[in-house]
Amino acid sequence: MTANILALISEPMTSITDFMLSAVAFYIFFSINKIESKKRSVINWSKFFLFLGFSTFFGGIAHAISDRQDNLIYDLVWLFMQLSSGLSVFYAQSAAFRSEIRNRKTQRILHKVSLIQLMINQISRFGI
Protein backbone atom coordinates (compact mmCIF):
# COMPACT_ATOMS: atom_id res chain seq x y z
CA MET A 1 0.00 0.00 0.00
CA THR A 2 2.76 2.48 0.95
CA ALA A 3 4.67 1.67 -2.23
CA ASN A 4 1.53 2.43 -4.26
CA ILE A 5 1.12 5.83 -2.61
CA LEU A 6 4.80 6.68 -3.13
CA ALA A 7 4.45 5.71 -6.79
CA LEU A 8 1.90 8.52 -7.17
CA ILE A 9 4.39 11.11 -5.88
CA SER A 10 6.65 12.50 -8.60
CA GLU A 11 9.65 13.32 -6.39
CA PRO A 12 9.03 11.66 -3.00
CA MET A 13 12.38 12.42 -1.32
CA THR A 14 12.34 16.06 -2.38
CA SER A 15 8.74 16.41 -1.20
CA ILE A 16 9.48 14.76 2.15
CA THR A 17 12.53 16.98 2.65
CA ASP A 18 10.47 20.08 1.81
CA PHE A 19 7.75 19.07 4.27
CA MET A 20 10.33 18.42 7.00
CA LEU A 21 11.92 21.82 6.44
CA SER A 22 8.46 23.38 6.45
CA ALA A 23 7.67 21.80 9.83
CA VAL A 24 10.94 23.06 11.30
CA ALA A 25 10.36 26.56 9.90
CA PHE A 26 6.83 26.73 11.36
CA TYR A 27 8.13 25.42 14.70
CA ILE A 28 10.76 28.17 14.79
CA PHE A 29 8.16 30.76 13.74
CA PHE A 30 5.86 29.80 16.62
CA SER A 31 8.82 29.65 19.04
CA ILE A 32 9.96 33.15 18.09
CA ASN A 33 6.41 34.46 18.46
CA LYS A 34 6.44 33.34 22.10
CA ILE A 35 9.22 35.85 22.71
CA GLU A 36 7.72 39.15 23.81
CA SER A 37 9.89 41.44 21.74
CA LYS A 38 9.01 44.51 19.77
CA LYS A 39 12.42 44.62 18.12
CA ARG A 40 12.01 44.88 14.37
CA SER A 41 14.79 42.34 13.75
CA VAL A 42 12.99 39.70 15.85
CA ILE A 43 9.70 40.38 14.07
CA ASN A 44 11.44 40.13 10.69
CA TRP A 45 13.13 36.82 11.60
CA SER A 46 9.72 35.54 12.65
CA LYS A 47 8.23 36.50 9.27
CA PHE A 48 11.21 34.93 7.49
CA PHE A 49 10.49 31.56 9.10
CA LEU A 50 6.75 31.93 8.45
CA PHE A 51 7.24 32.49 4.72
CA LEU A 52 10.01 29.89 4.55
CA GLY A 53 7.50 27.45 6.02
CA PHE A 54 4.89 28.34 3.42
CA SER A 55 7.43 28.24 0.60
CA THR A 56 8.77 24.81 1.47
CA PHE A 57 5.25 23.48 2.14
CA PHE A 58 4.07 24.58 -1.30
CA GLY A 59 7.38 23.36 -2.73
CA GLY A 60 6.70 19.92 -1.28
CA ILE A 61 3.32 19.84 -2.98
CA ALA A 62 4.79 21.10 -6.26
CA HIS A 63 7.49 18.43 -6.23
CA ALA A 64 4.90 15.78 -5.41
CA ILE A 65 2.82 16.63 -8.47
CA SER A 66 5.60 17.83 -10.78
CA ASP A 67 4.90 15.18 -13.41
CA ARG A 68 1.47 16.78 -13.86
CA GLN A 69 2.75 20.29 -14.58
CA ASP A 70 0.21 21.20 -17.21
CA ASN A 71 -2.67 22.07 -14.93
CA LEU A 72 -3.98 25.02 -12.92
CA ILE A 73 -3.40 23.43 -9.50
CA TYR A 74 0.30 22.89 -10.17
CA ASP A 75 0.65 26.42 -11.55
CA LEU A 76 -1.02 27.95 -8.47
CA VAL A 77 1.02 25.88 -6.02
CA TRP A 78 4.23 26.79 -7.87
CA LEU A 79 3.25 30.48 -7.86
CA PHE A 80 2.50 30.49 -4.12
CA MET A 81 5.83 28.76 -3.49
CA GLN A 82 7.70 31.38 -5.52
CA LEU A 83 5.89 34.33 -3.91
CA SER A 84 6.47 32.95 -0.41
CA SER A 85 10.12 32.32 -1.19
CA GLY A 86 10.61 35.92 -2.31
CA LEU A 87 8.98 37.21 0.88
CA SER A 88 11.13 34.95 3.06
CA VAL A 89 14.32 36.28 1.44
CA PHE A 90 13.10 39.86 1.90
CA TYR A 91 12.44 39.33 5.61
CA ALA A 92 15.78 37.55 6.13
CA GLN A 93 17.56 40.51 4.55
CA SER A 94 15.55 42.98 6.63
CA ALA A 95 16.28 41.09 9.84
CA ALA A 96 19.98 40.91 9.06
CA PHE A 97 20.15 44.63 8.27
CA ARG A 98 18.31 45.52 11.49
CA SER A 99 20.35 43.27 13.74
CA GLU A 100 23.83 43.70 12.26
CA ILE A 101 24.04 47.20 10.78
CA ARG A 102 23.96 50.01 13.31
CA ASN A 103 23.98 52.97 10.94
CA ARG A 104 20.33 53.95 10.36
CA LYS A 105 21.02 55.58 7.00
CA THR A 106 22.70 52.42 5.72
CA GLN A 107 19.79 50.35 7.06
CA ARG A 108 17.29 52.51 5.16
CA ILE A 109 19.29 52.30 1.93
CA LEU A 110 19.61 48.52 2.16
CA HIS A 111 15.94 48.22 3.05
CA LYS A 112 15.01 50.17 -0.09
CA VAL A 113 17.28 47.95 -2.19
CA SER A 114 15.57 44.90 -0.66
CA LEU A 115 12.14 46.33 -1.46
CA ILE A 116 13.17 46.87 -5.08
CA GLN A 117 14.47 43.29 -5.21
CA LEU A 118 11.20 42.03 -3.73
CA MET A 119 9.07 43.99 -6.19
CA ILE A 120 11.10 42.73 -9.16
CA ASN A 121 10.93 39.17 -7.79
CA GLN A 122 7.19 39.22 -7.21
CA ILE A 123 6.32 40.91 -10.50
CA SER A 124 8.57 38.54 -12.46
CA ARG A 125 6.63 35.57 -11.10
CA PHE A 126 3.67 36.64 -13.19
CA GLY A 127 5.71 36.70 -16.39
CA ILE A 128 5.32 40.43 -16.88
Image: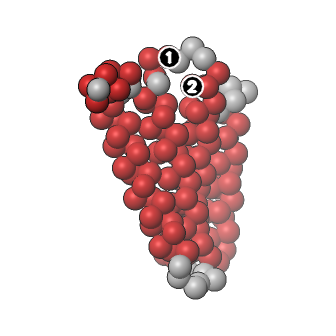
Q: Which quadrant holds the C terminus?
A: top right
Q: Which class describes the residues within 10 Å of circle 2: few (<14), some (14-19), or many (20+)?
A: many
Establish if 7 lies above or below 111. Answer: above
Q: Which quadrant holds the N terminus?
A: top left
Work out whether residue 45 can be spotted: no
Residue carrying label 2: 74
Work out whether residue 49 can be spotted: yes
How has the structure been colored for display?
secondary structure
Q: Nearer the viewer, residue 117 or 86?
A: 86
Question: Residue 115 is drawn in which quadrant?
Answer: bottom right
Residue carrying label 1: 68
**How far from the left and from the top, in percent, is residue 104?**
64, 78
Q: Nearer the viewer, residue 118 or 46?
A: 46
How many labels were placed on the picture? 2
Residue extending farthest front:
1
N-terminal of the two: label 2 or label 1? 1
Check contact, mark 2 vs mark 1: CB within 8 A.
Answer: yes
Q: Describe the element under mark 2 as helix, strand or loop.
A: helix
Establish if 20 lies above or below 38. Answer: above
Query: Label 1 amino acid?
Result: Arg
